Image (tube, rainbow, N blue to C red):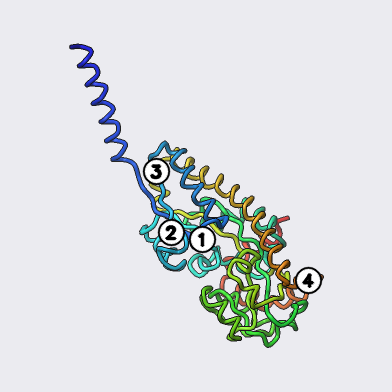
Amino acid sequence: MKQKLATRLVGATAMLTLLCGAAVAEQWRGWNIHVDGYPNTVAMEKFAELLAEKTGGEITLQMFHGGTLGSQPDAIEQVRLGGLEIGNFNLGPIGPIAAEANVVSLPFIFKDVPHMFRVLEGEGGQKISDGMAAKGLTPLAWYDAGARSFYNGAKPIEAPADVAGMKVRVMNNDLYSGMISELGGNPSPMAFAEVYQSLKTGVVDGAENNWPSYESTGHFEVAGYYSLSQHLIIPECLCINTDVYNALSDDMKAAVKEAAVESAELQHQLWAEREAASREKVEAAGVKTNEIADKTPFQEAMVPVYEAYLAANPDLRPLVELIQATE
């Protein structure tokens, strides 16, 4: 009798534990624009796995890839407002929302990708994070998006004069439009999904992006010259809604952050592999690539872009100077 009672008590306790756990467990939803197999998609799935593991199942994450929950601007707003808890976003479209994040969109602000990560892991990165968090987006980790370079179907770009007169697709940000204008080209902001057909039909003469995007979209099929200007090195962030993050206990914050950082380490590795594979594929298909021996003329052409930006955002001059001074 005593044994049966003890067994029932243990069973009841276990059930109560499960019920309590279910009551406090949270299920988050996450957005990602990239397709299956893309480095970011693999890394975000890893983040979901690590999140459940490191929080003891108290937080789980259901990822929605391929932009299935809406466009990137829409998803950014959803995370800011709490409709989604998690998002993997490029800082380009976050720039108009959080001024500090827009600094990374200044052309040639970073010397190279390693320099970008040194900035993000230091005081400059903290200032950018603080600015984003104040707008509802708290960065948990930084993902690699490589360097963006120019491509077109007519000729290699080796000097600013080669851009003159070209219609170049850019993301919807005044800094990118200003960059093309100062090089003598005609900026054409448009949705990414429209670029292939626009290149094919001559609506635009060229565009700019990183190796994996240039390859995976088939843009190399209609724009066979890829010039390594590396004018924009814009990271992506694994972001969380600020209120959701601030409501977590210190232990949970640490667990979430740790899961994000580990996913970023995986993403960096996968990105490097994908970048190399994409370059190899397009060059094997006949794409003509060229290094730009001297980027100084391009950088000098950006002086008006910087002056206009800092005139409109004088409070951000220290951040710009901090980034430029970071070794």
Between 204 and 103, the one lying in front of the other is 204
Q: Earlier in the sequence, mark 4 or mark 3?
A: 3
Q: Amino acid at mark 3?
A: Ile
Q: Are marks 4 and 3 in contact (CB under 8 Å)?
A: no
Any part of residue 122 in sight: no
> Hey, which residue is sitting farthest left in the picture?
1
Q: Is residue 189 above or below residue 275?
A: below
Q: Nearer the viewer, mark 4 or mark 1?
A: 1
Residue 59: mark: 3
Between 221 and 19, the one lying in front of the other is 221
**Where is mark 4, residue-wise?**
292
Q: Quadrant of residue 284?
A: bottom right
Secondary structure of the residue carrying tag 2 is loop
Q: Earlier in the sequence, mark 1 or mark 3?
A: 1
Q: Amino acid at mark 1?
A: Val
Q: Amino acid at mark 4?
A: Ile
